[in-house]
Amino acid sequence: MPGTSEAAELCSTIEESARLLNVAYSRDRVWSLLSAYGDAFAHPGAVVAFRVATAMRHVGELDCRFTTHPDDRDPYARALSHGLTPETDHPVGSLLAEVQGRCPVESHGIDFGVVGGFKKIYAFFTPDDLQKTSKLAEIPAMPRSLAGNVEFFARHGLDDRVGVFGIDYPSRTVNVYFNDVPAGSFDPETIRSTLREIGMAAPSERMLKLGEKAFGLYVTLGWESSRIERICYAAATTDLTTLPVPVEPEIEKFVRSVPYGGDDRKFVYGVALTPQGEYYKLESHYRWKPGAMDFI
């Protein structure tokens, strides 16, 4: 497959990063995924990023995500054909095709864990044609929890701001990423009231400080519940010392352990809130290009 030399280079980079982070590494697992999408990594516009998170369920994991250039119009079929994810009759299996059939998808991305393997497919919409949650909610395979929260999104000025849509196949959840979020959404009092409204844990002062610097947010929804499962606020920077909060020791170790390309290093730092509490995650870009959409 074209691009396998670039895939091999990335595979070696992941192996070294995993070693430094004490993350269990299986070359067969990582290579099976990278080689399945091997043509992506030779493209000059390819974007590749690494991510870690502080939540207990993320301990011992290193995530990698990349764009599928030249764009693979059916990345889910490729995942199935290479045995990266099992076939299913659950609606999650038909959702990507239905989103593509109703919305102008510009490109796609893949997310996988060095330990957990294949996880997500992202559908990116063009920045000048953001989608409506009300339109997405009409898709037959979509979790009904999206339709149940459309009014909430509309009241917060988010209904027509969907820039990225993510499908998590093992977890059977979806992520809805909002761009051009109204600035008032990041005001501390607005964050507090928003979290109360959807039943999340009260935010820490640390979270509120980071929230004031956020550029966007996303929510996680599933088929098993009508409520929003998680909400995440994200800030972007090229210098972590400019953030209004210190980073955690495990994130500092991640920064020291994963490589990056280009003159400036780019980070997306996020705080996720659930009914049980909050946790933090950091994405570091290994390959980037101007105009690529920020999200975490």
Image: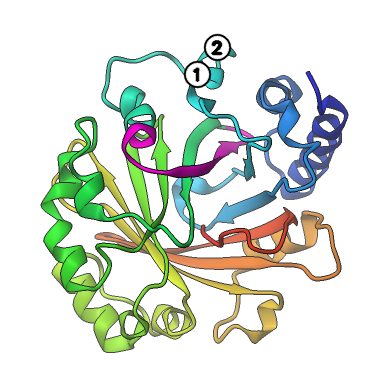
Amino acid on which the number 1 mark rests in the picture:
Ala
User: Mark 2 Cα within 10 Å, few/some/many (few <14, many 20+)?
Assistant: few
Q: Are marks 1 and 2 in contact (CB under 8 Å)?
A: yes
Q: Is residue 120 left or right of residue 221?
A: right
Asked whether 111 or 255 is in front, the reply is 111
Asked whether 18 or 39 is in front, the reply is 39
Colour style of the rendered protein structure:
rainbow
Q: Is residue 274 above or below residue 239?
A: above
Q: Which residues are magenta?
A: 99-115
Q: Is residue 9 left or right of residue 61?
A: right
Quadrant in which the N terminus is drawn: top right
Q: Is residue 95 left or right of residue 180?
A: left
User: Mark 1 Cα within 10 Å, few/some/many (few <14, many 20+)?
Assistant: some
Secondary structure at badge 1 equals: helix
Amino acid on which the number 2 mark rests in the picture:
Ser
Q: CA distance from mark 1 to mark 2?
A: 6 Å
Residue at image mark 2: 81
Secondary structure at badge 2 equals: helix
Residue at image mark 1: 77
Residue at 80%, 71% in the rendered image: 264
Instruction: Mark yes or no: residue 143 visible.
Output: yes
Q: Position of residue 4 (x, y in %)?
A: 82, 25
Q: Is residue 111 within the magenta segment? A: yes
Q: Position of residue 20 (x, y in %)?
A: 79, 48
Q: Position of residue 156 (x, y in %)?
A: 22, 73
